[in-house]
Image (spheres, helix red, strand yellow):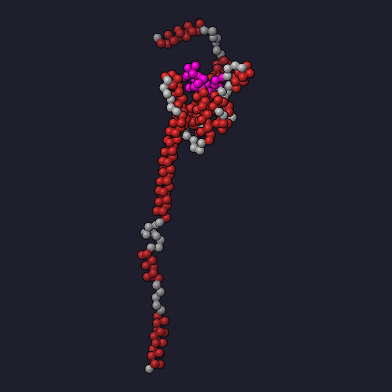
Amino acid sequence: DDGLSTAQSIAAAARVSMGMECNHEDMANIMNFTERMVALATYRAQLGLYLEDKMRHVAPNLTTIVGDTVGARLIAKAGSLSSLAKCPASTVQILGAEKALFRALKNKGNTPKYGLIYHSTFVGRATKKDKGRISRYLANKCAIASRIDAFADELTDKYGIQMREQVEERLRFFDTGAQPRKNIDVMNAVKAQLGTSAMNQDEEDKNAHSSKKIKKKKRSIPSEEDQPGSSTKKKKTTDHDEPMPDASLSETKNKSDKKKKKREL
């Protein structure tokens, strides 16, 4: 019954469809096209994994806020991460919309509110009237994150995590009116957290270094049994190695003593 119903559905679709018969040449071309599509999809997935890993090592805070794709586009548009870090937030906001900006300035119209940053999920989640405000706020956070990534001695994504939460709080503020946290409080909290973690790391390094020194000292001081020239061995060797008195020397001494006594008498 299942096979009969499938055949009937295929026959009905063949009567209604606009297709034609497919010969071997057409099927070969179709197979080549599908194989290329599958290869391109696999290559795209590999590139996505490579880009995600590279962005996590180069700009972890910027990647945490806007994602690896949008962050990479911003860096590519600016020229480098250091160039992006030197841009103000207003430039980051309209980065990628230069043509629309110059057109608006020439025609004295409204300037664009967002450029590449429009592809972020935060701008898409905002309402139509709040898209401009959230894009300005998000550009501010991206500018701060890029400067931290470009000029920090040790890279960490803790700043990016906290700033992403700030953007979430700003979205809730637009919807419900809940007051978000201040930026200075968030930065001080992250700084204190990094300070405590650095202190703990320093203590662990000191303990590890001291334990290594103790191990080296123990290895450099051998035990009495392991010493090559111990005292017992020395005693035995000295007993055997003492020179025996010569018999001829003793006889000559006795003769000389006897001669002296006779002279005295």
Q: Taking 155 as reference, is 16 above or below it?
A: above
Q: Residue 14 or 249: which is nearer the viewer?
A: 249
The residue shown at (45%, 23%) is: 170
x%, y% of residue 85?
A: 55, 31
The residue shown at (51%, 27%) is: 140
x%, y% of residue 82?
A: 56, 33
- In the rendered image, the quadrant that contains the C terminus is bottom left
- In the rendered image, the quadrant that contains the N terminus is top left
Q: Is residue 265 left or right of residue 126?
A: left
Viewer can see residue 51: no
The residue shown at (56%, 13%) is: 23
x%, y% of residue 17?
A: 52, 7
Q: Is residue 115 left or right of residue 168?
A: right
x%, y% of residue 216?
A: 42, 52
| Magenta-drawn segment | 112-135
The residue shown at (41%, 11%) is: 2
Q: Is residue 129 left or right of residue 247?
A: right
Figure label count: 0
Q: Quadrant of residue 256?
A: bottom left
119 inside magenta stretch = yes
Q: Taking 169 as reference, is 148 above or below it?
A: below
